[in-house]
Image: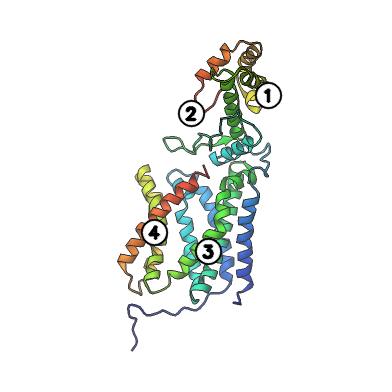
Amino acid sequence: MRRYPLAIWAGIVFALALSASALYWDSSRIDLGADASWGTVATVNSEYRAATEQLSLPEGHKWPKATPYTDRAPDGAAYSYAAGVGREWAEWYWFGAWASVAVSSTEPTSVRQAAIDRLPEFYKTTAFSTTTEPGYYRRIITAAQKGDCDGLREYVEALDDSTGEGG
Amino acid sequence: MTHLTARTKVPFRPVSPSIVGWAFLAGAGLGVVAKLLGRVQGLDLLGVGVAFWVTAGFLLARQAAKGHGLLDGTVWAGTTMAVYLGAWLLSYCAAFGLQQSAGFGAAWLDERIYFILTAPASILLGFLAAASLRPDWLGDACLAAPIAWTVPEVIFAFSRGWQYVTLAALPAALIAGIPLAMSRQRRVSWTVFAAACAAGAGVGYLLLHVIDGRFA
């Protein structure tokens, strides 16, 4: 067996420990907490992936691989994102997906009703708590629960499919 | 009278194991420098880039491999590279967390892919560093490695404008040429060198786009 000095063995252990730690400590194991105020798009996407593991989409819908956010503006200026942006994007996407099923003209009534019943869960999300128009969302959800889906249909039609973002 | 011929092996004395410690210090210092440069317009491309910093570690790794055969040299160079890269990443993340008040956790998640790749990449980089010391076609091809992984970033700098070419691409290109300059005692096969540059640049370009997508 070749003999290497202690420094070499220490270096090997150091490198392996770093790689193994990175494999283990992913976004589901690290709580960014309230002090993590700004991050890059990778942080946003980490939050997004963690949120997608907790939210369920309607059958036939899939989560996008990542959010549409970028690290830099077209002029090259760097973007920084507040903590929670990734999670909120996932929640908006979730709401848009269930809303689209609720007003779908091809789904059976039972499926559409089940989707309408899921919509009030949106009130518990960070996205709803930070939107500037909570009243609007309460109106369209309440109206849908009472059988009037016109407002919800208008929302879905106006939704930007590329971002899935509302609010 | 003896003289060096085209393929004469130049004997080197192995370096002290303390080079591993120096690699740690160099990585830690340069990681902070890279994060600070990321805030300076024109130099930010250098700060957020990969090539310049990896090449700096590569130079250290070559030193560590001197005086050893290919296998032992790969172990010495790979370990030196791994310690350098690990220290660089840790200090970069620490600076990231402090600078942006984001906490080490956010920085860790941001750079996690690079931490994962530290060990396997160091094996490859260690081999390249050790092999680049050989006075044969393998050595000529491995000498091209720093240039190959620098080319994609240099091309990107051109798309950003002359300020970025001068402040980011030029330093990266200069440091990438150091291994070749240090090999002036032997004759290099330019055909092998050029082919390795082209092939390596293509692979590096693809890898950067995959890694930059953070699995997306």
- Let me know if residue A167 appears in the view: no
Q: Are marks 1 and 4 on the same chain?
A: no
Horizontal side of residue B116 vs B189, given as left or right = right
How packed is label 4: few (under 14 Cα within 10 Å), some, or many (20 or more)?
many
How packed is label 3: few (under 14 Cα within 10 Å), some, or many (20 or more)?
some
Q: Residue at the left extreme?
A: B191
The answer to whether residue B123 is above or below residue B15 is: above
Q: Secondary structure at mark 3?
A: helix
How packed is label 2: few (under 14 Cα within 10 Å), some, or many (20 or more)?
few
Which residue is painted at 42% across and 73% down in the image?
B134
Q: Earlier in the sequence, mark 2 or mark 1?
A: 1
Residue A138, horizontal then vertical, whole percent: 65, 15
User: For residue A162, which numbered disc appears in the image?
Assistant: 2
Q: Quadrant of the N terminus of chain B?
A: bottom left
Residue B210, horizontal then vertical, whole percent: 47, 47
Q: Secondary structure at mark 4?
A: helix
Instruction: Give the amino acid at mark 4.
Output: Ile
Which residue is painted at 47% across and 52% down in the image?
B50
- Residue that carries the numbered disc 1 in the rendered image: A121
Residue A21, horizontal then vertical, whole percent: 64, 53
Q: Are marks 1 and 4 in contact (CB under 8 Å)?
A: no
Q: CA distance from mark 1 to mark 3?
A: 49 Å
Which residue is painted at 58% across and 53% down in the image?
B116
User: For residue B123, which numbered disc appears in the image?
Assistant: 3
Q: Are marks 2 and 1 in contact (CB under 8 Å)?
A: no
Specify the subunit that label 2 lies on.
A
Q: Earlier in the sequence, mark 4 or mark 3?
A: 3
All told, the count of numbered labels is: 4
The answer to whether residue B176 is above or below residue B189 is: above
Mark 4 against mark 3, which lies toward the viewer?
Answer: 3
